[in-house]
Image (cartoon, helix red, strand yellow):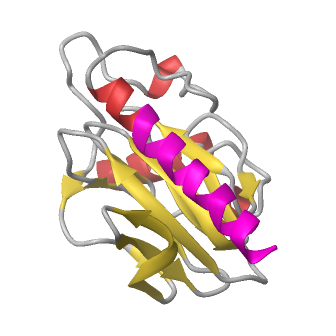
Amino acid sequence: MLMSYLIRYRRLCLFAVSAAALLAVGLVGPRVGVAAAQGATRATAGGSGCPGKEGPTQYLGKTEVRPSPRAVVNGKPMTGTWSEPGAHSYWHCHPGGQFLIVMEGVGRAQKRGERMRELKVGDIEYAGPWVEHWHGAGPDAEVQFVQVAMQPTGTRWQEKVSDADYLGNDNGVASRLANLQSLEK
């Protein structure tokens, strides 16, 4: 039983890494078995990206970088992010995009303009280049993600995730508008 469980996770990790490699070399588009990002949050033809600033990781709640023994590359565990119940990132984007794989627990993720999705063990979430998103643990469960960032790497941090977004009651647009209005003052 344990062996079949480990084989399943190895296949999931290989899928994510393979999909990331195919995306990086342009052999496939961003629809690789996961939902594609909405066009409204993607980079423009000029590559302007999304608003925000490079800087230290911004999370609400406790998170730690931890190895994930179930995800192994070249004989070594991949590193992932563990989050306590309720902990989650701020809104952010990556110039090259990002895959998230839930290795343990229950997570949540949301792309700007879409509803929050609850993620269970084995689920894969993809945010394409410059797609504004957040991710973290569910309110009652820890989560361990393995993250695969695409080149070019980096993170642009934005505003805190609203309670309405975290609870799944909004699509991230109201929090963006409130943030923009606060910047004008």
> What residue lies at 67% left-to-right and 85% top-to-bottom?
85
For the point 55% across and 60% down, the residue is: 135
Q: Residue furthest top?
A: 45
Quadrant occupied by the N terminus: bottom right
**Of 6 and 182, which appears nearest the observer?**
6
List x then y, in percent, for residue 39.
50, 18
Q: Residue at x 54, y 28 (%)?
A: 37
- Residue 180 location (% of width, % of height): 40, 46
What residue is shown at x 38% (from left), y 52% (from top)? 148
Count up the numbered dots. 0
Q: Is residue 116 above or below residue 81?
A: above
- The picture places residue 121, in percent across and down from the top left corner, at 72, 64
Q: Where on the picture, by quarter, is residue 80?
A: bottom left
Q: On the rendered image, what quadrant is the C terminus found in?
A: bottom left
Residue range (magenta): 1-19
Going by the image, does 102 lie left or right of 40?
Answer: right
